[in-house]
């Protein structure tokens, strides 16, 4: 298969880094295995009871502080190195670049639906451009599902009533598997999708030939919803003060709460603000926002 990603090296920078971490851990394990087993065998041979030798008295050995210090310090350093190396890569996995294209993923029994920023949507197939970071913002309408890109070495659960995300920057054109990794009912085994990585030209062409959706871009849909739902009675979009805090520039900002804590305004915080406004009250404003539970769809 010409497009088989497994024969072509790293499909993304992070996939290579994850492999390196695993290689590092395996090598460390191997080195220590050889050292400890080597000594084990060496001592077993060297100090074995020789034939025809009288069984003498076993020497009384109380310990060796230097030896103990060494076998505490060296393995601790190795374990610490594994942690730090793993953490540095994990941090990259969890930090999408700000310019990542955001694709919404809705999982349900038993398919993945993808919605692009312009409102277009596809099922079980998502097309992205090579070299461009994409962020999958995911939620489920029923049970817990999973989003697993084995070739990219990343995976994340998809939960109902909450948002999780995953990001990748594909570096190789090709077609890659997406699997659901949570047992989600009888159709679980067929719950798969394809991530199709297109070259710049192919992506452009696909974007153009694909007929534009009837629906508006997502941001535009959101703006209309905010206008129609009465939010603007209490919230401004231009930064000016009303009863409630302005919504301008809210997303991603750190919000100070009445109880002295702070929270980053991410997807989950916004969702909670609409469904359970009393859960986190913004500092210096009266808690008068009504709940939109049952009024607005997820
Ligand atoms: Cu599933």
Image (cartoon, rainbow, N blue to C red):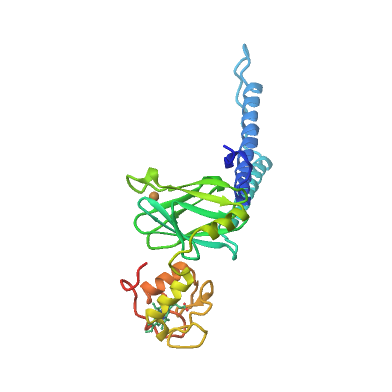
Locate residue 60: give its quadrant: top right
Residue at the limit of the structure toward the left, as seen here: 294
User: Would you say 152 lies left or right of 47 here?
Assistant: left
Query: Residue 193, how many percent across, how many down?
Result: 45, 48
Query: Residue 73, how many percent across, how many down?
Result: 65, 46
Residue at the limit of the structure toward the top, as seen here: 52
Can you say whether 176 is above or below 245 in the image?
Answer: above
Query: Residue 13, how many percent across, how many down?
Result: 63, 51
Judging depth in this view, the residue of 244 and 23 nearest the camera is: 244
Q: Is residue 173 visible?
A: yes
Query: Residue 108, how many percent across, how many down?
Result: 37, 54
Locate residue 276: give its quadrant: bottom left
User: Looking at the image, which residue is at 49% across and 82% down?
Assistant: 237
Residue at the limit of the structure toward the right, as seen here: 66
Can you say whether 202 is above or below 220 in the image?
Answer: above
How many dots with numbers? 0
Tell me the quadrant of the picture where the N terminus can be found. top right
User: Would you say 4 lies left or right of 42 here?
Assistant: left
User: Would you say 277 lies left or right of 238 here?
Assistant: left
Judging depth in this view, the residue of 180 and 285 nearest the camera is: 180
User: Looking at the image, which residue is at 49% across and 62% down?
Assistant: 116
Tell me the quadrant of the picture where the C terminus can be found. bottom left
Can you say whether 171 is above or below 39 in the image?
Answer: below
Q: Is residue 168 visible?
A: no
Can you say whether 204 is above or below 267 in the image?
Answer: above
């Amino acid at each position: 298969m010409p497009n088989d990603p497994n024969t072509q090296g790293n499909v993304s920078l992070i996939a290579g880094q994850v492999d390196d971490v695993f290689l590092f851990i395996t090598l460390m394990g191997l080195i220590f295995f050889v050292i400890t087993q080597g000594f084990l065998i060496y001592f077993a041979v060297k100090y074995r009871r020789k034939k025809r030798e009288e069984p003498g008295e076993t020497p009384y050995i109380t310990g060796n502080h230097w030896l103990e210090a060494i076998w505490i310090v060296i393995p601790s350093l190795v374990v610490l190195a594994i942690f730090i190396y793993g953490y540095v890569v994990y941090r990259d996995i969890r930090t999408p670049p700000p310019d990542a294209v955001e694709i919404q993923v809705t999982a349900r029994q038993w398919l993945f639906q993808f919605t692009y920023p312009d409102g277009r949507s596809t099922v079980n197939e998502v097309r992205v451009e090579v070299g461009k970071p994409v962020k999958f913002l995911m939620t489920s309408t029923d049970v817990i599902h999973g989003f697993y890109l084995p070739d990219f070495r990343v995976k994340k659960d998809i939960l109902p009533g909450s948002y999780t995300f995953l990001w990748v920057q594909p570096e190789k054109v090709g077609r890659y598997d997406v699997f659901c990794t949570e047992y989600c009912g009888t159709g679980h085994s067929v719950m798969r999708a394809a991530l199709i990585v297109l070259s710049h030209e192919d992506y452009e062409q696909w974007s153009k030939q694909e007929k534009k959706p009837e629906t508006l871009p997502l941001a535009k849909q959101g703006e209309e919803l905010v206008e129609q739902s009465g939010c603007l009675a209490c919230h401004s979009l231009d930064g000016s003060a009303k009863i409630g805090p302005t919504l301008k520039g809210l997303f991603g900002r750190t919000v100070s709460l009445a109880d002295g804590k702070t929270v980053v305004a991410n997807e989950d915080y916004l969702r909670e603000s609409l469904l359970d406004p009393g859960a986190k009250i913004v500092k210096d404003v009266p808690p008068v926002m009504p709940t939109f539970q049952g009024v607005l769809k997820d």
